[in-house]
Image: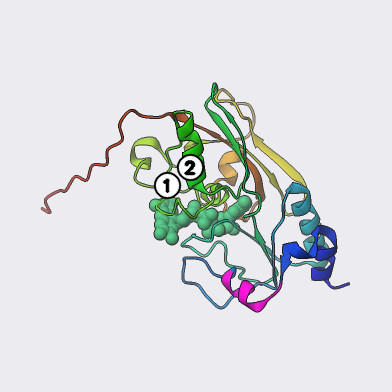
Amino acid sequence: MDWIEKIKEEIGKESVLEEIETRKIYSRDESGIENFLCDCVVFPKNEKEIIKVLRIANEFKIPVTPRGGGTGVVGGAIPLKGGILLSLSKMNKIIDIDEKNFLIEVQPGVILKKIYEEAQKLNLFYPPDPASFENCTIGGNVATNAGGPRCIKYGVTENYVLAIEGILPSSEKIYAGKKTRKWKAGYNLPKILIGSEGTLCIFTKIFLRLLPKPEYIETLIVPFEKK
Ligand SMILES: Cc1cc2nc3c(=O)[nH]c(=O)nc-3n(C[C@H](O)[C@H](O)[C@H](O)COP(=O)(O)OP(=O)(O)OC[C@H]3O[C@@H](n4cnc5c(N)ncnc54)[C@H](O)[C@@H]3O)c2cc1C
């Protein structure tokens, strides 16, 4: 059986798009790199579906490129070798906010702006602020270790990731880190995964720490004389 048909059979044909127009849209990001077309765009709705897709990809030796909001500027979400473009956009739920412990648990396709909004409702604050915050996803932020102007004071995405759950290319599940501030045992696996640009695993759940919302937020631009 054709591998695309097999994916459709496993996760539903409505979650697999093959039209050329869709493939073109999902085969580019903000890097300007073009002319690399995926064979199909797959929209898993949960972790189990990702595992099913990766099993088929392994069986048929098909390349898989994960994608969040497609705002990346270095071509990480471009399907250079064709195959499956795996869009995480349907896994976009905020699973839990633990107000007392300043933690938020999210699916990878959550748009960053949504995290700001939900944190704000509880007087909490998530600092990393790439200018693409209205379109980029937290999965993409972790995979690129995104930053922004606030990172000069607060640090980049890696300073807020406590733990990651993901699926390895082999389709096995991985747990990296712990959802507590006070954790130090063993290898620091989250740090290896952060900034990995989709090459090591597909993030399915991310645990982030939050801060109390600052009373005032001001942006300062300090010009220097050229000597
Ligand atoms: C106008 C504009 C302003 C920007 N400003 C900034 C800025 O201030 N700071 C900054 O750091 N960046 C900035 N960027 C770059 C970009 O927005 C960030 O890199 C962002 O983190 C990408 O997120 P995304 O969801 O769009 O990821 P995508 O572009 O979809 O993917 C980026 C990488 O992440 C991987 N990936 C995505 N989801 C997953 C997942 N669930 N599991 C594993 N891998 C995954 C992809 O394979 C790819 O390698 C900007 C981009 C634009 C267009």
- Residue 65 at x, y = what percent? 64, 62
Task: Please rate how many residues cluster around mark 1, counting C-alpha atoms within 10 Å: few if below 14, some from 14 to 19, many from 20.
Answer: many
**Residue at image x 63%, y 30%?**
178
Q: Are marks 2 and 1 in contact (CB under 8 Å)?
A: yes
Residue position marked by numbered label 2 in the rendering: 157
Give the x, y percent position of residue 166.
68, 45
The residue located at (62%, 68%) in the rendering is: 79
**Gap in angstroms between the C-alphas marked 2 and 1:** 6 Å
Query: x, y percentage for residue 162?
Result: 57, 33
Asked which secondary structure carries label 2, the reply is: helix
**Disc 1, ligand 1: is the CB inside 8 Å?**
yes
Where 135 falls versus 26 (above or below)?
above
| Magenta residues, start to end | 18-25
- Dot 2: few (<14), some (14–19), or many (≥20) neighbours within 10 Å? many
Which disc, if any, is residue 147?
A: 1
Residue reaching furthest to the right: 1
